[in-house]
Amino acid sequence: MAYRGIGAPAFGYNRATYTLPHPLKGSRNETFEPEQEVYTNILNKLMPQERVLRFVGEYEFSEVSQTTLGLLTNIFNRSLIMMWAPHSDYPKICYPVIVDEFMITPVNGMISIDGLTLKLRGVEPTNFIPNLDNMFKLTNHPAKASVNLLTAGSFVIGDDYVIENEGDTDWGAIGAGTEAALNTNVGSSYIILVTGTTNFTLIGALDSDVGTHFRATGAGTGDGEVIEAEFTATGAGSGTGTAFKI
Protein backbone atom coordinates (compact mmCIF):
# COMPACT_ATOMS: atom_id res chain seq x y z
CA MET A 1 0.00 0.00 0.00
CA ALA A 2 1.49 3.35 -1.04
CA TYR A 3 2.02 5.87 1.73
CA ARG A 4 -0.54 8.65 1.85
CA GLY A 5 0.35 11.41 4.29
CA ILE A 6 -1.93 14.13 5.56
CA GLY A 7 0.37 17.12 5.05
CA ALA A 8 0.17 19.66 2.25
CA PRO A 9 2.77 19.40 -0.56
CA ALA A 10 6.07 21.26 -0.28
CA PHE A 11 8.79 22.07 -2.78
CA GLY A 12 12.46 22.92 -2.45
CA TYR A 13 14.35 25.35 -4.65
CA ASN A 14 17.57 27.35 -4.25
CA ARG A 15 18.18 25.82 -0.79
CA ALA A 16 14.82 26.96 0.59
CA THR A 17 11.61 25.03 1.25
CA TYR A 18 8.09 26.30 0.52
CA THR A 19 4.87 24.67 1.73
CA LEU A 20 1.76 24.95 -0.43
CA PRO A 21 -1.83 24.91 0.86
CA HIS A 22 -3.80 21.67 0.90
CA PRO A 23 -5.06 20.70 -2.58
CA LEU A 24 -8.79 20.81 -3.27
CA LYS A 25 -10.65 17.67 -2.22
CA GLY A 26 -10.16 14.93 -4.81
CA SER A 27 -7.63 16.96 -6.80
CA ARG A 28 -4.45 15.28 -5.51
CA ASN A 29 -3.40 12.54 -7.93
CA GLU A 30 -0.02 10.85 -7.41
CA THR A 31 1.01 7.89 -9.54
CA PHE A 32 4.13 5.97 -10.54
CA GLU A 33 4.35 5.30 -14.25
CA PRO A 34 6.34 2.25 -15.44
CA GLU A 35 9.41 3.04 -17.53
CA GLN A 36 10.57 -0.38 -18.74
CA GLU A 37 9.20 -2.39 -21.65
CA VAL A 38 7.86 -5.96 -21.32
CA TYR A 39 9.94 -8.65 -23.03
CA THR A 40 9.17 -12.24 -23.94
CA ASN A 41 11.59 -15.09 -24.56
CA ILE A 42 11.59 -17.52 -27.50
CA LEU A 43 8.95 -19.61 -25.71
CA ASN A 44 6.69 -16.56 -25.60
CA LYS A 45 6.92 -16.29 -21.82
CA LEU A 46 7.21 -12.96 -20.08
CA MET A 47 10.69 -12.23 -18.81
CA PRO A 48 10.87 -10.70 -15.32
CA GLN A 49 12.36 -7.21 -15.37
CA GLU A 50 13.50 -4.87 -12.62
CA ARG A 51 10.67 -2.49 -11.80
CA VAL A 52 11.51 1.04 -12.92
CA LEU A 53 8.96 3.74 -12.10
CA ARG A 54 8.65 7.50 -12.50
CA PHE A 55 6.70 9.78 -10.14
CA VAL A 56 3.88 11.84 -11.68
CA GLY A 57 1.74 14.23 -9.63
CA GLU A 58 -1.29 16.36 -10.49
CA TYR A 59 -2.76 18.93 -8.08
CA GLU A 60 -5.29 21.74 -7.93
CA PHE A 61 -5.09 24.48 -5.30
CA SER A 62 -7.78 27.05 -4.58
CA GLU A 63 -5.53 29.76 -3.12
CA VAL A 64 -1.78 30.27 -3.58
CA SER A 65 0.12 33.44 -2.65
CA GLN A 66 1.47 35.71 -5.38
CA THR A 67 5.00 35.23 -4.02
CA THR A 68 4.81 31.45 -4.40
CA LEU A 69 3.13 31.76 -7.79
CA GLY A 70 5.91 34.05 -8.99
CA LEU A 71 8.57 31.54 -7.94
CA LEU A 72 6.74 28.60 -9.54
CA THR A 73 6.20 30.64 -12.72
CA ASN A 74 9.95 31.22 -12.95
CA ILE A 75 10.67 27.51 -12.37
CA PHE A 76 8.14 26.53 -15.05
CA ASN A 77 9.23 29.12 -17.64
CA ARG A 78 12.89 28.18 -17.25
CA SER A 79 12.24 24.41 -17.11
CA LEU A 80 14.15 24.22 -13.82
CA ILE A 81 14.31 21.17 -11.57
CA MET A 82 12.92 21.43 -8.05
CA MET A 83 12.50 18.92 -5.23
CA TRP A 84 8.89 17.92 -4.55
CA ALA A 85 7.65 16.47 -1.27
CA PRO A 86 4.06 15.26 -1.85
CA HIS A 87 3.37 15.39 1.89
CA SER A 88 5.13 17.93 4.09
CA ASP A 89 4.47 15.81 7.19
CA TYR A 90 6.91 13.24 5.76
CA PRO A 91 9.60 15.24 3.91
CA LYS A 92 11.85 12.15 3.50
CA ILE A 93 9.63 11.22 0.55
CA CYS A 94 10.66 13.68 -2.15
CA TYR A 95 11.50 13.63 -5.84
CA PRO A 96 13.41 15.89 -8.27
CA VAL A 97 10.72 17.03 -10.74
CA ILE A 98 10.03 19.41 -13.58
CA VAL A 99 6.71 21.21 -14.08
CA ASP A 100 4.92 19.82 -17.16
CA GLU A 101 1.72 21.88 -16.84
CA PHE A 102 1.10 25.14 -14.99
CA MET A 103 -2.16 27.09 -15.00
CA ILE A 104 -3.13 30.04 -12.80
CA THR A 105 -6.82 30.65 -12.11
CA PRO A 106 -7.74 34.17 -10.88
CA VAL A 107 -9.73 34.27 -7.64
CA ASN A 108 -12.55 36.83 -7.82
CA GLY A 109 -12.10 39.80 -5.54
CA MET A 110 -8.68 38.73 -4.29
CA ILE A 111 -5.52 40.70 -5.00
CA SER A 112 -2.76 38.67 -3.37
CA ILE A 113 -3.83 35.07 -4.14
CA ASP A 114 -4.89 32.94 -7.11
CA GLY A 115 -5.79 29.32 -7.82
CA LEU A 116 -3.27 26.94 -9.36
CA THR A 117 -3.23 23.68 -11.31
CA LEU A 118 0.08 21.77 -11.45
CA LYS A 119 1.31 18.65 -13.23
CA LEU A 120 4.76 17.40 -12.24
CA ARG A 121 7.01 14.67 -13.65
CA GLY A 122 9.98 13.05 -11.94
CA VAL A 123 13.33 13.40 -13.69
CA GLU A 124 14.85 10.34 -12.04
CA PRO A 125 13.42 6.79 -11.96
CA THR A 126 12.78 4.86 -8.76
CA ASN A 127 12.52 1.15 -8.04
CA PHE A 128 9.77 1.12 -5.46
CA ILE A 129 6.68 2.93 -4.25
CA PRO A 130 7.20 4.21 -0.68
CA ASN A 131 4.95 2.63 1.93
CA LEU A 132 4.89 2.26 5.70
CA ASP A 133 7.06 -0.88 5.49
CA ASN A 134 9.88 0.36 3.27
CA MET A 135 10.15 4.04 4.19
CA PHE A 136 13.24 3.27 6.28
CA LYS A 137 15.10 2.78 2.97
CA LEU A 138 14.65 6.43 2.07
CA THR A 139 17.37 8.95 2.81
CA ASN A 140 16.72 11.22 5.75
CA HIS A 141 16.61 14.70 4.23
CA PRO A 142 13.91 17.32 3.71
CA ALA A 143 12.84 18.76 0.37
CA LYS A 144 15.74 20.85 -0.88
CA ALA A 145 17.40 22.10 -4.03
CA SER A 146 18.37 19.41 -6.53
CA VAL A 147 21.91 18.02 -6.38
CA ASN A 148 21.94 17.55 -10.16
CA LEU A 149 23.40 21.00 -10.86
CA LEU A 150 26.73 20.64 -12.68
CA THR A 151 29.35 23.11 -13.91
CA ALA A 152 30.72 23.05 -17.44
CA GLY A 153 33.61 20.61 -17.66
CA SER A 154 31.56 17.94 -15.87
CA PHE A 155 29.00 17.18 -18.58
CA VAL A 156 28.89 13.62 -19.91
CA ILE A 157 28.54 13.06 -23.64
CA GLY A 158 25.09 11.67 -24.44
CA ASP A 159 23.43 12.87 -21.21
CA ASP A 160 20.58 15.40 -21.28
CA TYR A 161 20.78 18.76 -19.51
CA VAL A 162 18.83 22.01 -18.94
CA ILE A 163 20.93 25.18 -18.84
CA GLU A 164 20.61 26.97 -15.49
CA ASN A 165 23.16 29.77 -15.93
CA GLU A 166 24.86 30.56 -19.24
CA GLY A 167 28.06 31.96 -17.70
CA ASP A 168 30.82 32.22 -20.31
CA THR A 169 30.32 28.67 -21.63
CA ASP A 170 30.04 28.12 -25.38
CA TRP A 171 26.87 26.03 -25.23
CA GLY A 172 26.57 25.77 -29.00
CA ALA A 173 29.89 23.92 -29.08
CA ILE A 174 28.56 21.14 -26.84
CA GLY A 175 25.15 20.46 -28.35
CA ALA A 176 22.80 23.35 -27.53
CA GLY A 177 21.51 24.57 -30.89
CA THR A 178 20.81 28.18 -31.77
CA GLU A 179 17.68 29.27 -33.64
CA ALA A 180 16.16 32.39 -35.13
CA ALA A 181 13.21 33.60 -33.04
CA LEU A 182 10.81 32.83 -35.88
CA ASN A 183 11.70 29.11 -35.57
CA THR A 184 10.82 28.65 -31.90
CA ASN A 185 8.54 25.69 -31.15
CA VAL A 186 5.55 25.81 -28.81
CA GLY A 187 6.40 24.21 -25.45
CA SER A 188 10.17 24.16 -25.96
CA SER A 189 12.52 26.04 -23.62
CA TYR A 190 14.93 28.71 -24.84
CA ILE A 191 17.32 31.41 -23.67
CA ILE A 192 17.42 34.76 -25.45
CA LEU A 193 20.78 35.12 -27.19
CA VAL A 194 20.16 38.25 -29.31
CA THR A 195 17.14 40.53 -28.77
CA GLY A 196 17.27 42.26 -32.16
CA THR A 197 13.83 43.46 -33.25
CA THR A 198 11.96 40.57 -31.63
CA ASN A 199 9.42 41.18 -28.85
CA PHE A 200 9.92 37.98 -26.87
CA THR A 201 7.12 38.83 -24.41
CA LEU A 202 4.68 37.94 -27.21
CA ILE A 203 5.93 34.34 -27.27
CA GLY A 204 6.17 33.51 -23.56
CA ALA A 205 9.13 35.44 -22.12
CA LEU A 206 8.84 37.77 -19.13
CA ASP A 207 10.99 40.31 -20.98
CA SER A 208 13.19 40.58 -24.08
CA ASP A 209 16.52 40.79 -22.25
CA VAL A 210 19.51 38.69 -23.30
CA GLY A 211 19.81 35.70 -20.94
CA THR A 212 16.08 35.41 -20.14
CA HIS A 213 14.83 31.82 -19.99
CA PHE A 214 11.34 31.13 -21.34
CA ARG A 215 9.04 28.41 -22.62
CA ALA A 216 7.81 29.34 -26.11
CA THR A 217 4.10 29.85 -26.74
CA GLY A 218 4.65 30.26 -30.48
CA ALA A 219 7.06 31.43 -33.16
CA GLY A 220 8.43 34.96 -32.96
CA THR A 221 9.05 37.65 -35.52
CA GLY A 222 12.03 39.86 -36.22
CA ASP A 223 15.72 39.00 -36.18
CA GLY A 224 16.15 37.90 -32.56
CA GLU A 225 18.04 34.69 -31.77
CA VAL A 226 17.70 32.04 -29.05
CA ILE A 227 19.64 29.06 -27.78
CA GLU A 228 17.95 25.80 -26.78
CA ALA A 229 17.80 25.49 -22.99
CA GLU A 230 17.49 21.68 -23.15
CA PHE A 231 20.25 19.80 -24.96
CA THR A 232 22.13 16.52 -25.24
CA ALA A 233 25.80 17.03 -24.43
CA THR A 234 28.33 16.41 -27.19
CA GLY A 235 31.23 17.39 -24.96
CA ALA A 236 32.23 18.14 -21.36
CA GLY A 237 32.16 21.91 -21.89
CA SER A 238 34.26 24.59 -20.26
CA GLY A 239 33.78 27.89 -18.49
CA THR A 240 31.46 28.99 -15.69
CA GLY A 241 28.08 27.91 -17.08
CA THR A 242 25.90 25.49 -15.10
CA ALA A 243 23.17 23.05 -16.09
CA PHE A 244 20.88 20.49 -14.46
CA LYS A 245 21.17 16.86 -15.52
CA ILE A 246 17.76 15.44 -16.49
Image (cartoon, grey):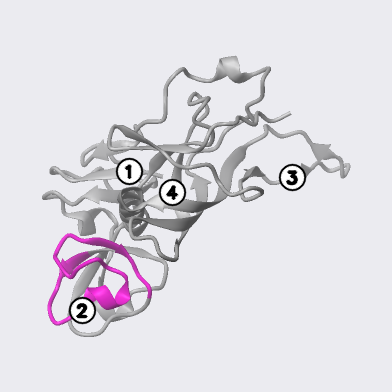
Which residue is drawn at the image coordinates 33% and 40% (left, top)? 156
**Front label number (1 vs 4):** 4
**Gap in Å between the C-alphas at discs 2 and 4?**
27 Å
Residue 202 shown left or right of residue 104 in the figure: left
**Gap in Å between the C-alphas at discs 2 and 1?**
28 Å
Counting residues from the start of the chain, the first of labels 1 and 4 encountered is: 4
Q: Is residue 195 magenta?
A: yes
Which residue is drawn at the image coordinates 57% and 46% (left, top)? 56
**Gap in Å between the C-alphas at discs 3 and 4?**
27 Å
Q: Which residue is mark 4?
A: 98
Q: Quadrant of residue 83?
A: top left
Q: Badge 3, how many Cα within 10 Å: few under 14, some, many 20+?
A: few
**Gap in Å between the C-alphas at discs 1 and 3?**
30 Å
Please give the label number shown on residue 38: 3
Counting residues from the start of the chain, the first of labels 2 and 1 encountered is: 2
State the image coordinates of residue 121 (x, y, percent, origin top left). 51, 48
**Front label number (1 vs 3):** 1
Counting residues from the start of the chain, the first of labels 2 and 4 encountered is: 4
Read off the magenta span: 192-217
- Quadrant containing the C terminus is top left
Residue type indicated by callout 1: Phe
Marks counted in the figure total 4
- Quadrant containing the N terminus is top right
**Front label number (2 vs 1):** 2
- Residue 46 seen in the figure: yes
Q: Which residue is mark 1?
A: 244
Query: Observer-nearest residue: 141 or 161?
Result: 141
| SS state under label 2 | loop
Q: Residue furthest top?
A: 136
Q: Main secondary structure of the magenta part?
A: loop
Residue type indicated by callout 4: Ile
